[in-house]
Image (cartoon, helix red, strand yellow):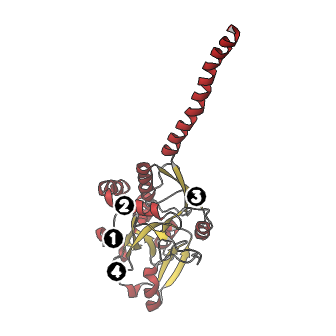
Amino acid sequence: MDAWIKYRLSTIPKLFLIFFIFCLPFKSSMAIVQDETVTYRVGVSYINSYPLLSFANVDDKGYGWAVLEAFAKANNVAFEYIGMPITRLQPSLDNGGLDFIFPDHPKWSNFRTARQPNIYSGPIISTISATFVLSTNKNKQLEDLKSVAIPFGYTSYTWTQPIEKYGIKTVPVGDLRAALESVVNKRTDSADVEYNIGKHLIDKYPHLQKLDINKNYPNAEVNYHLSTIRHADIAKRITAFIDANPSLISELKQKYNIKEHSEVY
């Protein structure tokens, strides 16, 4: 009898330990679920558009990236940026390989499919479609223009009518820097390059410093959005975050020296 009592007493700590171990993971797992960061896949193009965007950069990927990262930090989410050719972005969003495309715009429909409509956030970046020329030509009129360089991956809707009306020749070039260099080398009369990107390149490369914008030539404000098919709630939250944090947005614009259309034209 004494042996049986000793046996029963010896099992009590073990039973308590088993009960404790069983309960502890349940409580901990609930905490993990509550604190877990959800990661979304964002499709981005390989095009270097710094200071607006440059996802090839290791540390600093530009103004648009900084806005998204500020939102992510404040909302316990994470963005994984996946670079791919422009032609693959929309199909990857359609088939679920991506959660978002950035940047995107409703008019950029060359590779859109009819499967599901894209849902867009509010503007994340307000860009300036501008025309760079030699400084000596910055006051010329549109009827004097003979050619314009258009970088690969860019569609300039501001040029459609002038090209038709004045018979302006379009010259495709590999990238934004090549577009500006074509003007410096007098292979073209002008280059369709976003203002902030153009100014950044001119400041970086001395041989481009003879360029300036011609305010008589096509220009427009073009907004960049985040697009999605399945995560409309995140798109709405990003829009609300930007609207609710004007001081942060102003600080980031100052950091990256981003100008808006109304400040330039």
Residue at x-position 60% and y-position 63%:
84
Pick the quarter of the image with the C terminus. Answer: bottom left
Task: Report how far apart the C-alphas of labels 3 and 1 lie in the structure.
Answer: 30 Å
Q: Circle 4 sits on which residue?
A: 216
Mark 3 neighbour density, 10 Å: few (under 14) some (14–19) many (20 or more):
some
| Amino acid type, label 4 | Asn
Mark 4 neighbour density, 10 Å: few (under 14) some (14–19) many (20 or more):
few
- Of circles 1 and 2, the one toward us is 2
Up/down of 224 relative to 190, above or below: above
Q: Which x, y percent locates residue 126?
A: 38, 67
Task: Report how far apart the C-alphas of labels 1 and 2 lie in the structure.
Answer: 22 Å
Q: Indicate the secondary structure of the residue bearing disc 1.
A: helix
Q: Where residue 82 is drawn, which disc sits there?
A: 3
**Which of the two labelled residues, at mark 4 and mark 3, occupies the earlier sequence position?**
3
Q: Where residue 261 is drawn, which disc sits there?
A: 1
Q: Indicate the secondary structure of the residue bearing disc 2.
A: helix
| Amino acid type, label 1 | His
Task: Report how far apart the C-alphas of labels 4 and 2 lie in the structure.
Answer: 36 Å
| Front residue of 123 and 10 | 10
Q: Which x, y percent locates residue 185?
A: 49, 72
Mark 2 neighbour density, 10 Å: few (under 14) some (14–19) many (20 or more):
some
Q: Where residue 175 is drawn, which disc sits there?
A: none
| Amino acid type, label 2 | Ala
Task: Report how far apart the C-alphas of labels 1 and 4 lie in the structure.
Answer: 14 Å
**Which of the two labelled residues, at mark 4 and mark 2, occupies the earlier sequence position?**
4
Q: Circle 2 sits on which residue?
A: 240
- Of circles 4 and 3, the one toward us is 3
Residue that extends furthest to the top in the rendered view of this protein: 2
Q: Indicate the secondary structure of the residue bearing disc 3.
A: strand
| Amino acid type, label 3 | Ile
